[in-house]
Image (cartoon, rainbow, N blue to C red):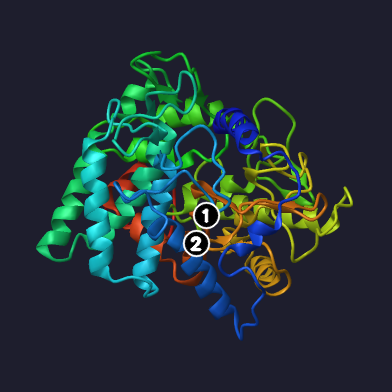
C-alpha cells in the first residue's frame, strides 16, 4: 500500500537529507512570511493560506511540465532523487489548486489556460502504461522509479490526476474554442486509461501497479477503506475501459467486510479502516484525497454514509489531540491533526494509535469542510500565535513542540489538499465541478451510490 511504499522511500531519502529529528537551525527562519501577523478576519486568513499553498503549484512548479514537484525543501537539502521529480498524484491536486487560484483572483483565466496547455502537452507525451502514468516522472517525461519494482503504471496516483483533470475539463468545456480544445484533450487522456487492465486478467479487484519490467510483482490489490475510493469510482465511470460493480463489491468492499466499524473516542468509524491490524482509524489524508472532487455531502452507498465517515474521522483526530493521552507538549483544541508526513525519524503515518507527537498542518486545514470551527482555530493558531512554522508556501509539512523539531520542507501531496478543501468549504467549487461530470455520475450510479448531487436524468 502507499504507506508502505512512501515510508520505504522517504526513510532512505531522509537519511541522505539529514532529516533525522534534530533541531533545525536559524537558517530555517529565513523563509518568507515566517512571523506572526495580526489579521482582522477568518476570511483574510483563509485567503492567505490558500494563496500560499496555491503558490506551491504555481511559482513552485517544475518548469518544463508545469506540474508539481514531489517536494520543495527551503533548506535546499535533497535526497538522491533530483529536486525536480514530478509527482503524478500531487499534480492532480495542483491542477485543482490552480482552479482555486483563478476563482480567488491570484491568477487570470488566461494564465491558467496557458499552464494547463503546457501540462497536457507534457502528459500526452510522458510515459504511460496501459494508460496509467507512473508515480513519478523526470522532467523529460520518462519514468522515475518510486522503488525498485515500482517503475510502471500507478493506478492510484493516476486516479488522483484524473480527478483533477476532470475538474479542469468541466471548468473550461463551455468556454472559447481554445478552452474547448483543452477539454477535449483531457477527455482523450481520460479515455486512454485502461482501468480494467489493472484487474490482472479479470480478477474482481483493482491492482495498484503494473510494470513492463516486473509485471505484477508489486502485488498490491486495493481493498478495504483507505484513500483510494476515487480509483474505484473512476474505474466504474470510464467510458472506454470500465470495471463492473462486482469488482467494487468484492475488491474494494471485501465482500462486505469493509463495514466492520468500531467506536473510537465516542464516535463511530463507519467503516473498517484497517484490514490487517486493530487500528481504529487511519491518517487523515484518507478523508481528503478522494474527496477533493468527490463530494461526500449526502453521499451514501450500501456500505457507508461518507459525510459521517469523514466528519467522524476528523473529529476523532481532534478529540485525540485535545485529550492528549500521551501528554505531548503543544497538543490542544487549536493545535491538532495527524496524517502521513515528514516526521522525527524519516516519514510516518501518524494517527491516534500511532502518535509520535508530530502535528501535520494539512490534517486540520484540509478537514475544514468537516470540522470548520476546529480547523479555523488551528488556522488562527498557526498564523497568529507562533513565529517559525509558516514559510513561502504556507505551513511547513510537520512540526513537534514535544521534540522541538520542524523542517522548512513541503510535500505536494500535503500542500495540495489545503487550498482545495478550504475552497470546498468556502464555495464548494471543486465538488461542483467534479460531480457535474456525466461519466462520473454514471459511474456512481453504477456502483449504487446515492447523492443529492447526482442528476437523476443522467
Do the residues bearing badges 2 and 1 touch, measured as CB atoms within 8 Å?
Answer: yes
Looking at the picture, tell me which residue is in the foreground, 379 or 21.
21
> Does dot 1 land on a helix, a strand or a loop?
helix
The numbered dot on residue 308 is: none
- Name the side, left or right, on which 277 lies relative to 237: right
x and y percentages locating residue 181 in the rendered image: 13, 54
> Does dot 2 land on a helix, a strand or a loop?
helix
The numbered dot on residue 53 is: 2
x and y percentages locating residue 316 in the rendered image: 73, 52
x and y percentages locating residue 389 in the rendered image: 66, 62
- Name the side, left or right, on which 186 lies relative to 308: left
Quarter holding residue 199: top left
Asked if residue 386 is positioned above or below residue 187 in the image, the reply reads below
- Residue sitting at 15 percent across and 58 percent down? 180
Residue 119, can we see it? yes
Quarter holding residue 33: bottom right
The numbered dot on residue 415 is: 1
Dot 2 or dot 1, earlier in sequence: 2
- Residue sitting at 63 percent across and 48 percent down? 284
Looking at the picture, tell me which residue is in the foreground, 75 or 181.
75
- Residue sitting at 44 percent across and 46 percent down? 90
Amino acid at each position: 500500500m502507499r504507506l508502505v511504499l512512501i515510508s520505504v522511500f522517504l526513510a532512505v531519502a531522509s537519511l541522505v537529507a539529514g532529516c533525522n529529528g534534530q533541531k533545525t537551525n536559524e537558517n530555517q527562519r529565513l523563509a518568507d512570511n515566517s512571523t506572526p501577523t495580526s489579521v482582522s478576519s477568518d476570511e483574510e486568513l483563509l485567503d492567505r493560506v490558500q494563496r500560499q499553498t496555491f503558490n506551491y503549484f504555481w511559482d513552485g512548479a517544475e518548469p518544463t511540465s508545469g506540474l508539481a514537484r514531489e517536494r520543495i525543501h527551503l533548506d535546499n537539502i535533497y535526497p538522491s532523487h533530483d529536486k525536480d521529480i514530478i509527482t503524478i498524484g500531487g499534480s492532480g491536486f495542483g491542477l485543482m489548486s490552480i482552479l482555486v487560484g483563478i476563482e480567488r483572483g491570484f491568477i487570470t483565466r488566461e494564465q491558467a489556460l496557458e499552464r494547463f496547455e503546457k501540462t497536457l502537452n507534457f502528459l500526452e507525451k510522458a510515459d504511460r502504461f496501459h494508460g496509467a502514468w507512473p508515480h513519478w516522472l523526470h522532467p523529460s517525461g520518462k519514468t522515475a522509479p518510486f522503488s525498485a519494482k515500482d517503475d510502471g503504471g500507478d493506478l492510484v496516483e493516476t486516479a488522483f490526476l484524473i480527478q483533477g483533470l476532470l475538474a479542469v475539463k468541466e471548468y473550461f468545456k463551455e468556454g472559447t474554442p481554445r478552452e474547448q480544445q483543452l477539454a477535449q484533450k483531457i477527455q482523450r487522456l481520460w479515455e486512454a486509461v485502461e482501468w480494467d487492465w489493472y484487474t490482472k486478467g479479470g480478477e474482481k479487484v483493482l491492482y495498484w501497479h503494473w510494470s513492463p519490467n516486473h509485471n505484477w510483482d508489486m502485488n498490491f490489490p486495493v481493498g478495504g477503506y483507505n484513500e483510494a475510493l476515487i480509483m474505484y469510482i473512476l474505474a466504474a465511470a470510464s467510458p472506454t475501459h470500465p470495471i463492473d460493480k462486482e469488482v467494487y463489491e468484492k475488491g474494494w468492499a471485501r465482500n462486505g467486510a469493509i463495514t466492520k466499524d468500531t467506536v473510537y473516542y465516542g464516535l463511530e468509524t463507519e467503516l473498517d479502516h484497517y484490514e490487517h491490524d486493530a487500528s481504529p482509524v487511519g491518517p487523515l489524508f484518507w478523508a481528503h484525497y478522494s474527496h477533493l472532487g468527490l463530494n461526500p455531502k449526502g453521499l451514501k452507498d450500501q456500505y457507508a454514509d461518507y459525510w459521517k465517515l469523514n466528519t467522524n474521522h476528523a473529529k476523532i483526530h481532534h478529540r485525540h489531540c485535545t485529550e492528549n493521552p500521551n501528554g505531548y507538549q503543544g497538543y490542544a483544541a487549536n493545535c491538532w491533526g495527524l496524517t502521513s508526513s515528514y516526521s522525527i525519524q524519516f516519514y510516518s503515518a501518524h494517527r491516534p494509535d500511532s502518535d509520535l507527537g508530530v502535528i501535520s498542518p494539512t490534517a486540520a486545514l484540509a478537514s475544514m469542510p468537516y470540522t470548520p470551527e476546529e480547523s479555523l482555530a488551528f488556522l488562527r493558531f498557526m498564523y497568529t500565535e507562533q513565529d517559525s512554522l509558516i514559510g513561502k508556501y504556507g505551513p511547513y509539512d510537520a512540526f513537534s513542540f514535544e521534540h522541538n523539531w520542524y523542517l522548512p520542507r513541503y510535500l505536494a501531496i500535503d500542500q495540495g489538499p489545503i487550498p482545495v478543501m478550504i475552497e470546498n468549504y468556502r464555495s464548494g467549487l471543486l465538488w461542483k465541478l467534479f460531480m457535474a461530470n456525466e461519466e462520473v455520475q454514471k459511474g456512481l450510479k453504477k456502483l449504487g451510490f446515492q447523492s443529492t448531487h447526482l442528476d437523476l436524468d443522467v
